[in-house]
Structures are given as structure tokens and as C-alpha cells.
Image (spheres, grey):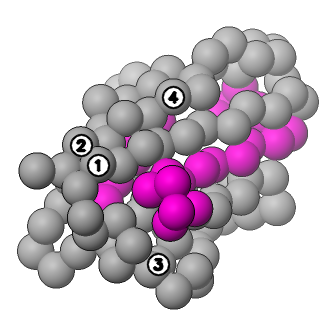
Amino acid sequence: QVQLVESGGGLVQAGGSLRLSCAASGSIFEIATMGWYRQAPGKQRELVAGITSGGSTNYTDSVKGRFTISRDNAKNTVYLQMSSLKPEDTAVYYCNMRWMSLNYWGQGTQVTVSS
């Protein structure tokens, strides 16, 4: 059974930075595609960034150049480095793991950016 535990959220002023971490249990981390999603109040959950097992990354347009996703397979951990944060980045951020038909979610961590 896979568990994903996010950490690193919090309150930050606009222009600041945060680094989110997601620690995964289980044995499929190294071969799984990992992603960070976010959901703001009243909005649908959206993909923020993803990283494949081979290290290829993709980002939603609104975070390109500001956010960086990375993974450490030795630590079973995926990171989201967020810089130049904006109030519109405020949301609950969720870690996601996908492999074949398997799809797992973390519990989410709140990121609040004040103006």
C-alpha cells in the first residue's frame, strides 16, 4: 500500500518562496510518474507540475519559470520548489503518484500567499 505525505506548506508573503516535499512509502516510487496538483476554493483541482520516472518535467503555464519539480529516488521523495509566489498560488497542494492503473493521492498541504 502506498502512502504519500506532504509537508512544507504555510503562509508566505507575495514574492516569497516555499519548498514542498512529498515522501512516498512502497516500492514503486522509482518507476512512477509523480505530480503536484492544487485546488483553490471554488475551483477544480489542476495539475501544477509533473515528473516522469525518467526525469522529464512539465508545468502548467502559470508557474513556468517560478516553480521547479524534482525527485530523489534514493529518498522516495518528490519536491516542488516555489519561488516568486503570487496570491493566486494560494491553494491546497496535493502530491500524486501514478503507475499503470494505480493512482495515489496525499492528504494535501495548504499554501497561502498574502499580498
Q: Secondary structure at mark 3?
A: loop
Q: Secondary structure at mark 2?
A: loop
Q: From mark 3 to mark 2, how far is it between C-alphas?
A: 18 Å
Q: Secondary structure at mark 1?
A: loop
Q: Which residues are magenta?
A: 72-97
- In the visual, does 47 lie left or right of 4? right
* Nearest the eye: 37 or 19: 19
* Nearest the eye: 65 or 41: 65
Q: Is residue 101 magenta?
A: no
Q: From mark 2 to mark 1, how far is it between C-alphas?
A: 5 Å
Residue 25 got which mark?
A: 1
Residue shown at 65% from the left, 32% from the top:
88
Determine if residue 92 is in view.
no
Q: Position of residue 63 (x, y in %)?
A: 70, 55
**Type of amino acid under label 1:** Ser
Q: Which residue is mark 2?
A: 3
Residue 52 got which mark?
A: 3
Q: Is residue 91 magenta?
A: yes
Q: Quick check: marks 4 and 2 in contact, CB under 8 Å?
A: no
User: Upstream in the sequence, badge 1 or badge 4?
Assistant: 4
Q: From mark 1 to mark 4, how far is it between C-alphas?
A: 14 Å
Residue shown at 73% from the left, 43% from the top:
82
Q: Quick check: marks 2 and 1 in contact, CB under 8 Å?
A: yes
* Nearer the camera: disc 3 or disc 1: 1
User: Upstream in the sequence, badge 3 or badge 1?
Assistant: 1
**Type of amino acid under label 4:** Ser
Q: From mark 4 to mark 2, how far is it between C-alphas?
A: 13 Å
Residue shown at 63% from the left, 49% from the top:
80
User: Upstream in the sequence, badge 3 or badge 2?
Assistant: 2
Determine if residue 85 is in view.
yes
State which quadrant residue 53 falls in.
bottom left
Residue 7 got which mark?
A: 4
